[in-house]
Image (spheres, rainbow, N blue to C red):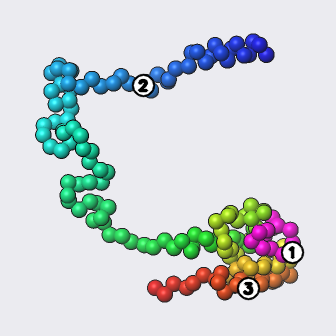
Amino acid sequence: MADENSQEQAALNRLAPAPGAKHPRKRLGRGIGSGTGKTCGRGHKGQKSRAGKKIKFGFEGGQMPVHRRIPKRGFSSRRAADWLRLPTGALAGLEPGEVTLAALRAAGLAGPRHRLVKFYSSGAVAAGYRLVGLAATKGARAAIEAAGGAVEAAAPAQQPKESSS
């Protein structure tokens, strides 16, 4: 034990950065032969050659910046992010009986950000499950009912809105 402790201390005093990880500071304005004399690598005149003010990221000298020139496309609904889609095969990991959002969270199938769950038909349903407050597609509903289960419709507030476009 004492021998291991002394080895750790000996190793700590020899810690050093990896070879090539550290570079010497570039010494600017130290004569014409240094390669960075006179203008210090900044070139002649212009906004970037001056000391003081920085140019904020994305600024293009007054020209309309690229992030404002390009067209904006698409739409991301925060409501859609709350929905969790699960295959019917995921029910195999649960005890037969009543399946709720709390039961899915306890089993690790749903996270805290998921408020709404919808099952789709993929995978076999072996036992009788009763989905309470959870949505299911027509195919998933048929598979669950064929296995002796039932799907109690989710509350109207939980149903996703159909997009009009």
Work out whether mark 2 precedes mark 1 in sequence or the reverse, and give the earlier one.
2
Q: Amino acid at mark 2?
A: Lys
Residue at which label 3 appears: 153
Residue at which label 1 appears: 97
Above/below status of 57 relative to 162: above
Residue bounds of the magenta highlight: 91-103
Dividing the image into 4 quarters, which one contains the N terminus? Answer: top right
Disc tally is: 3
Question: Is residue 93 on the magenta stretch?
Answer: yes
Mark 3 crowdedness (10 Å alpha carbons): few <14, some 14-19, many ≥20: some
The answer to whether residue 110 is left or right of residue 53 is right
The answer to whether residue 100 is left or right of residue 163 is right
Residue at the spot x=70%, y=65% of the render? 110
Residue at the spot x=27%, y=65% of the render? 69
Label 1 element class = strand
Residue at which label 2 appears: 22
Q: Nearer the viewer, residue 139 or 80?
A: 80
Label 3 element class = loop
Q: Amino acid at mark 3?
A: Ala
